[in-house]
Image (tube, rainbow, N blue to C red):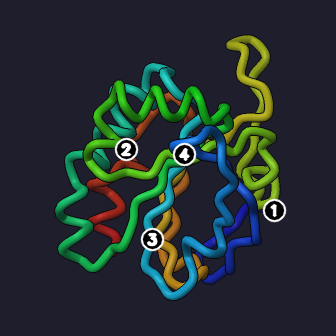
């Protein structure tokens, strides 16, 4: 069953690139006592993710800051090397968006947002969504109905919802 508004996110370890290589990030530590936007994409460098979803959060970063959001996290079922490069290529990293890899899709599966699309080579990937999480609890959840669109889960849509 998919996560929904009012649920507490499960504990999960994600991965990011640090100065000395890949490092584990305990999601619960990033969320505790904080207001955090979490959005997920089916894949780094995939068309809608690259041209619409990440840019929508870059455009709205200042508006989220003004609403007291402490951090914006982008999650994808990719490796941390790809997420680092993608964050640099899109400008997300310089904009202050945290790029985290759910390399084995454990978090994605735990919240019921996984899917597989063999015809396009996407295996055990994340459905597209955006959520506001306050102290680990989901206070707004906007899952996209189609993986190829970014309307419901865009930065502007989440901003309007909160």
- Measure the alpha-carbon separation of dots 3 and 1: 22 Å
Q: Nearer the viewer, mark 2 or mark 4?
A: 4
* Mark in front: 3 vs 1: 3
**Dot 4: what SS?**
strand
Work out whether residue 61 or residue 122 is closer to the camera in this orientation and state it. 61
Which one is earlier in the sequence, the residue at label 2 or at label 4? 4
Determine if residue 15 is in view.
yes
The residue under the point 28% across, 79% down is 68
Q: Quadrant of residue 64?
A: bottom left
Q: Secondary structure at mark 1?
A: loop
Q: CA distance from mark 1 to mark 4?
A: 33 Å
State the residue in front, 34 or 1: 34
Label 4 or label 3, whichever lies nearer to me, is 4
Left/right of residue 1 with respect to residue 96 in the rendered view:
right
Residue for badge 3: 36
Q: Which mark is residue 18?
A: 4
Q: Which residue is mark 2?
A: 151
Q: CA distance from mark 2 to mark 4?
A: 32 Å
Q: Quadrant of residue 125?
A: top right
Identify the residue at horizontal 52%, vertical 66% (top origin).
141
């Amino acid at each position: 069953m998919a996560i929904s508004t009012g649920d507490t996110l499960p504990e999960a370890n994600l991965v990011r690139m640090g100065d000395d290589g890949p490092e584990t990030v305990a999601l619960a530590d990033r969320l505790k006592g904080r207001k955090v936007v979490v959005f997920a994409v089916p894949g780094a460098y995939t068309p809608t993710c690259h041209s619409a979803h990440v840019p929508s959060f870059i455009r709205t970063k200042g508006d989220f800051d003004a609403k007291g959001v402490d951090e914006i996290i982008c999650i994808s079922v990719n490796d941390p090397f790809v997420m680092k490069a993608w964050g640099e290529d899109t400008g997300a990293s310089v904009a202050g968006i945290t790029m985290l890899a759910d390399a084995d899709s454990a978090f994605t599966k735990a919240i019921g947002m996984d899917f597989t699309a063999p015809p396009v080579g996407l295996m055990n990937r994340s459905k597209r969504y955006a959520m506001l999480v306050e102290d680990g609890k989901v206070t707004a959840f906007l899952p996209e109905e189609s993986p190829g669109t970014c309307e419901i889960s865009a930065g502007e849509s989440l901003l309007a919802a909160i």
